[in-house]
Image (cartoon, rainbow, N blue to C red):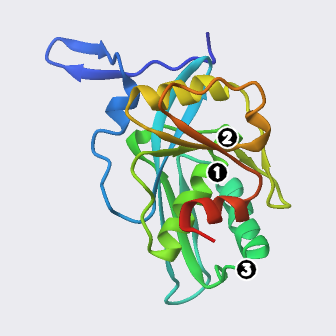
Amino acid sequence: STNEIGVFEMKDAGLAAVGNPSRLFLAERPQDVPGSAVIPCVEGTRPVLVEIQALVSRCAVGIPRRTAIGVDGQRLALLVAVLSKRLGLRLGDQDVFVNVTGGLKVEEPAADLGIVAAMLSSFLERTLAPEVAVFGEVGLAGEVRAVHQAELRLKEAHSLGFVRGLVPQGSLKGLKTPPGMQVAGVESVQDLYDQLFGR
């Protein structure tokens, strides 16, 4: 299917399929560093865990930059505006860089919450718990909207040792949580902020 992805690596004998791309994409994830968040994205029918990195720093000169690699640049500008308006963060004089590690391009809106979490982490200089995975679509009012295949995403995260999930509140209805995993619903970006960094 054209909606599916295949992950391969070059070896001595040629291209070889990667059996667990999530583990590959997270292999070099830094620990205790602000600006890193993990999202379970779904490409076609295949769940893949990827790391979103963000760097938010004061703009020295000129117009602040909004640079997106692996995610839509217009989507990034929208999320920066939502954080400025709904959380009152002063991002107007900040450069914002967002990158999806491993060279993967993530196009689905379910990545919004991971991008927001990474930007908050970098801006506040506070690391996220390494065992938490987040996903959800963010609207202009700061609300977090439900996304499809929440159960599949959580199952993939749990298989790689993640024990906490922050998901849209609307995705909790009828959701079967993997054994031993704590899952909390998020209604807004303010709610995400409170759950990640305390009230």
Q: Position of residue 47 (x, y in %)?
A: 53, 24
**Which of the pair 62/21 is nearer the observer?**
21
Q: Position of residue 115 (x, y in %)?
A: 58, 54
Q: Residue at x 73, y 34 (%)?
A: 172
In this rendering, position of residue 123 left or right of residue 23: right
Q: CA distance from mark 3 to mark 2?
A: 23 Å
Q: Considering only vertical position in the picture, is 19 above or below 35?
A: above
Q: Residues within 10 Å of mark 2 (few under 14, many from 20)?
A: many
- Label whose residue precedes the other's in the sequence (3 or 2): 3
Q: Which residue is mark 3?
A: 88
- Label whose residue precedes the other's in the sequence (1 or 3): 3
Of the 4 image quadrants, the one containing the N terminus is top right
The residue positioned farthest toward the right in the image shown: 141
Q: Quadrant of residue 46?
A: top right
Q: Residue at x 47, y 34 (%)?
A: 49
Q: CA distance from mark 1 to mark 2?
A: 7 Å
Q: Label 1: state its secondary structure.
A: helix
Q: CA distance from mark 1 to mark 3?
A: 17 Å
**Which of the pair 73/195 is nearer the observer?**
195
Q: Which residue is mark 2?
A: 110
The residue positioned farthest toward the bottom in the image shown: 61
Please state which amino acid type lies under the numbered disc 2. Answer: Ala
In this rendering, position of residue 88 left or right of residue 157: right
Q: How many marks?
A: 3
Q: Quadrant of residue 41?
A: top right
Q: Are marks 1 and 2 in contact (CB under 8 Å)?
A: yes
Q: Label 3: state its secondary structure.
A: loop
Q: Residue at x 57, y 28 (%)?
A: 153
Please state which amino acid type lies under the numbered disc 3. Answer: Gly
**Which of the pair 176/13 is nearer the observer?**
176
Q: Position of residue 180 (x, y in %)?
A: 47, 31
Q: Which residue is mark 1?
A: 113
